[in-house]
Image (cartoon, rainbow, N blue to C red):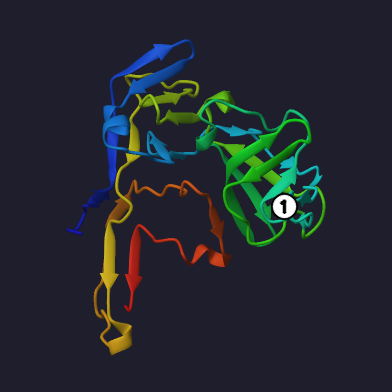
């Protein structure tokens, strides 16, 4: 950076043309529908904001292990320990845009990001699109989890939700925020800097220094099938990434 300056490299785009809808702001984003733009984080006046969640503070708790199923063809029992768990009545429902909902389940030192495949309202069992790394309640009963990213959870100032089917972004403003004095930025790109060496050939990127620069507003979306977050999330690509460096 030039002395006295702090250049900003941004991977985001400013959201404008808000309108009031009750106590919420709504912005229509055609690129969400036309180009498949999806994002999972937002910056409001320079502050990072998470999607709408339930509960707003703390956690919910699992209500037991999912009972085994009986295969009708073979009569054998099928274990669902890695892909389903029981929940307390009313805590998980068939909300609109159910594919958007992400269930964050804490599993010892890692996190499972579950996309919902099915909800059995009679037995109170939720089933996910992919298996978790560990069986639910493997480390003990009443496992912590919370739900995120659905319109029905938009009930606390600072929360937001993107309706991908309609291309609408909803935001519940905090006290003192007005459409005129608030800058909202949504991320577009995932990577800003990538250093790619060839360590298998002993060719490394060396003697490169970044100083006084700011890298902001990058995107990462939980895959449509969900995600297993292994220890240190080492499989997740970064905004500023270096390999063989």
Q: Which residue is mark 1?
A: 73
- Residue 245 sits in quarter: bottom left
- Residue 229 sits in quarter: bottom right
Q: Is residue 147 above or below residue 5?
A: above
Point 58% across, 66% down: residue: 231
Q: Position of residue 37 (x, y in %)?
A: 32, 38
Residue 59 makes an appearance in the image: no
In the picture, the quarter occupied by the N terminus is: bottom left
Residue that protrudes farthest toward the bottom in the picture:
202
**In the foreground, 18 or 230:** 230
Q: Relative to 206, is 130 on the left or the right?
A: right
Q: Position of residue 124 (x, y in %)?
A: 76, 36
Q: Position of residue 40 (x, y in %)?
A: 44, 41
Point 33% across, 36% down: residue: 185
Q: Is residue 127 above or below residue 132?
A: above
Point 33% across, 61% down: residue: 240
Q: Is residue 217 above or below residue 201?
A: above
């Amino acid at each position: 950076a030039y002395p006295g300056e702090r250049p900003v490299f941004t991977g985001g785009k400013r959201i404008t043309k808000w309108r009031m809808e009750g106590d919420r702001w709504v912005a229509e984003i055609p690129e969400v529908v036309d180009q498949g733009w999806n994002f999972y984080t937002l910056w409001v006046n320079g502050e990072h904001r998470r999607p709408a969640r339930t509960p707003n503070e703390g956690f919910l708790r699992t209500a037991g292990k999912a009972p085994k199923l009986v295969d009708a063809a073979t009569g054998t029992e099928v274990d669902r320990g890695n892909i389903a768990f029981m929940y307390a009545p009313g805590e998980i429902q068939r909300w609109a845009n159910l594919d958007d909902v992400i269930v964050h389940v804490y599993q010892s030192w890692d996190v499972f990001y579950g996309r919902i495949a099915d909800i059995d309202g009679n037995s109170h069992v939720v089933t996910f699109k992919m298996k978790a790394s560990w069986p639910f309640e493997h480390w003990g009963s009443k496992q912590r989890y919370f739900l995120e990213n659905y319109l029905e959870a938009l009930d606390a100032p600072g929360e937001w939700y993107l309706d991908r089917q309609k291309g609408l972004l909803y935001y519940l403003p905090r006290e003192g925020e007005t459409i005129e004095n608030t800058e909202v930025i949504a991320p577009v790109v995932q990577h800003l800097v990538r250093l790619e060496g060839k360590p298998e050939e002993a060719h490394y990127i060396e003697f490169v220094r970044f100083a006084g620069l700011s890298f902001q507003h990058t995107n990462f979306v939980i895959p449509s099938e969900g995600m297993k977050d292994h220890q240190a999330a080492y499989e997740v690509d970064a905004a500023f990434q270096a390999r063989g460096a």
